[in-house]
Amino acid sequence: MLAVSWGEVRAKRPPDEAAVAEHRARFDAEIRAHRLRFGAATEAALREVDDIVAGRVPAERYGSFDELLADTDLGE
């Protein structure tokens, strides 16, 4: 059984700045390598959503689901 807790041990030892910097550099590279990449159409749709939420583009409103379908390629 430990006489002190892990938190107490960590509190007494300052972080190794070189090791922290190395870990951050490696971790950041791993995050960039595994970041999701979207296609052009998805990127455009995400930008459009951001514009609608920000109020730069008015949101379209439909009175029924049939009107929505008529305005899409699925309604044809």
Image: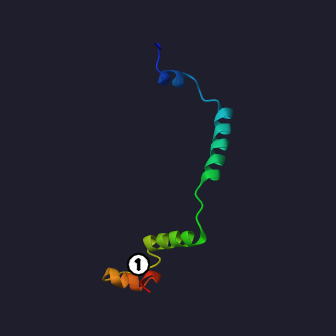
- Identify which residue is drawn at 39% across, 82% down: 69
Quarter of image, res 15: top right
- Identify which residue is drawn at 44% across, 82% down: 72
Taking 62 as reference, is 40 above or below it?
A: above
Taking 69 as reference, is 36 above or below it?
A: above
Looking at the image, residue 63 sits to the left or right of residue 71; the answer is left
In the image, residue 51 lies at what x, y percent?
48, 73
Dot 1 surroundings within 10 Å: few (below 14), some, or many (20 or more)? Answer: few
In the image, residue 30 lies at what x, y percent?
64, 47
Determine the residue located farthest toward the left in the rendered image: 63
In the image, residue 44 lies at what x, y percent?
55, 73
The amino acid type of the residue labelled 1 equals: Ala
Looking at the image, residue 33 sits to the left or right of residue 67; the answer is right
Image coloring type: rainbow
Residue linked to disc 1:
59
- Identify which residue is drawn at 46% across, 78% down: 57
- Identify which residue is drawn at 31% across, 83% down: 63
Taking 30 as reference, is 22 above or below it?
A: above
In the image, residue 64 lies at what x, y percent?
31, 82
